[in-house]
């Protein structure tokens, strides 16, 4: 029993270290945009981004949606409100998931789970391109859009992120098997 507990602690420490490396590597690739200088892909959903910002400023709840792409047209999937809801690939109704945009009330940037989920989406979907977080300053009623564009990332940087992600997933699976 003691050996399993020590192994679980070691794995957990390794997982936390990997999550930090993933987060730091990804954040180096992030770019900040104002609403007036959004990349073309995001201009197509500017109204939905503005909706997410306005509603989050009002009630402090996270808002999010998938970016969906079909025939070079970008739309949004079902909207999600609050941290208790989850986005589903089926929200794109037959179109390909192209990215993820969500607000962070009173939070500065990406969480490690944001990056892990984006990498998971990307591994199963070569069309996945954008991970965007909109940190909200509710007191000053301001926001910007902070994005990682995986398709424009240098190949060596993307490979490093994917390698860290794969290592994270292996250790996480070992930990889950150990505690079951």
Image (cartoon, rainbow, N blue to C red):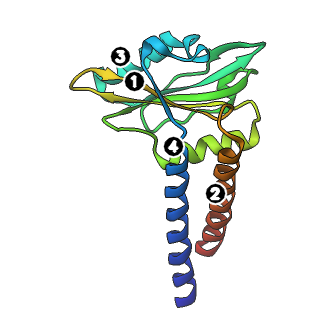
* Of marks 3 and 1, the one in the foreground: 1
Query: Which secondary structure, mark 3?
Result: helix
Q: Residues within 10 Å of mark 1 (few under 14, many from 20)?
A: some
Q: Does label 1 or label 4 sit earlier along the sequence?
A: 4
Taking the spot 21% from the left edge, 26% from the top edge, the residue there is 139
First reached walking from the N terminus: tag 3 or tag 2: 3
In the picture provided, is 123 more to the left or to the right than 136? right
- 140 to the left or right of 121: left
Front disc: 3 or 2: 2
Q: Earlier in the sequence, mark 3 or mark 1?
A: 3
Q: Residue at x 40, y 31 (%)?
A: 62
- Measuring from the top left, give residue 21's x and y in whole percent: 53, 57
The residue at 75%/36% (across/down) is: 125
Residue 68 lies in quadrant: top right
Quick check: marks 1 and 2 in contact, CB under 8 Å?
no
Q: Residues within 10 Å of mark 4 (few under 14, many from 20)?
A: few
Residue 164 badge: 2
| Mark toward the start of the polypeptide (3 vs 4) | 4
The number of numbered discs placed on residues in the rendered structure image is: 4
Q: Label 3: which residue?
A: 54
Quote the CA–CA distance across marks 2 and 4. 15 Å
Task: Provide the residue designation for mark 4.
Answer: 28
> In whole angstroms, how far apart are the C-alphas of marks 1 and 4?
17 Å
- How far apart in space, not on screen, are marks 1 and 2 (Cα)? 28 Å
Cα distance, mark 3 to mark 1?
A: 12 Å
Q: Report whether residue 65 is seen.
A: yes
Q: Position of residue 34 (x, y in %)?
A: 42, 18
Check if mark 1's residue and mark 4's residue have beta carbons within 8 Å. no
Element on which disc 4 rests: loop
SS class, disc 1: loop
- Please give the residue where the numbered disc 1 appears in the rendered image: 144
């Amino acid at each position: 029993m003691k050996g399993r507990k020590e192994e679980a602690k070691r794995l957990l420490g390794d997982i936390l270290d990997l999550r930090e490396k993933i987060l730091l590597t990804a954040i180096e690739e992030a770019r900040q945009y104002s609403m007036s200088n959004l990349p073309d892909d995001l201009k197509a959903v500017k109204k939905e981004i503005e909706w997410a910002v306005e509603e989050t400023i009002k009630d402090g709840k996270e808002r999010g949606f998938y970016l969906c792409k079909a025939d070079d047209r970008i739309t949004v999937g079902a909207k999600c409100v609050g941290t208790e809801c989850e986005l589903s690939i089926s929200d794109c109704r037959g179109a390909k998931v192209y990215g993820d945009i969500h607000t962070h009330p009173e939070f500065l940037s990406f969480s490690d789970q944001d990056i892990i989920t984006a990498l998971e989406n990307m591994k199963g979907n070569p069309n996945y391109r954008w991970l965007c977080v909109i940190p909200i300053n509710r007191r000053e009623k301001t926001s910007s859009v902070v994005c990682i564009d995986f398709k424009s990332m240098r190949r060596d940087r993307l490979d490093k992120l994917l390698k860290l992600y794969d290592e994270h997933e292996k250790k996480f699976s070992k930990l889950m098997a150990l505690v079951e």
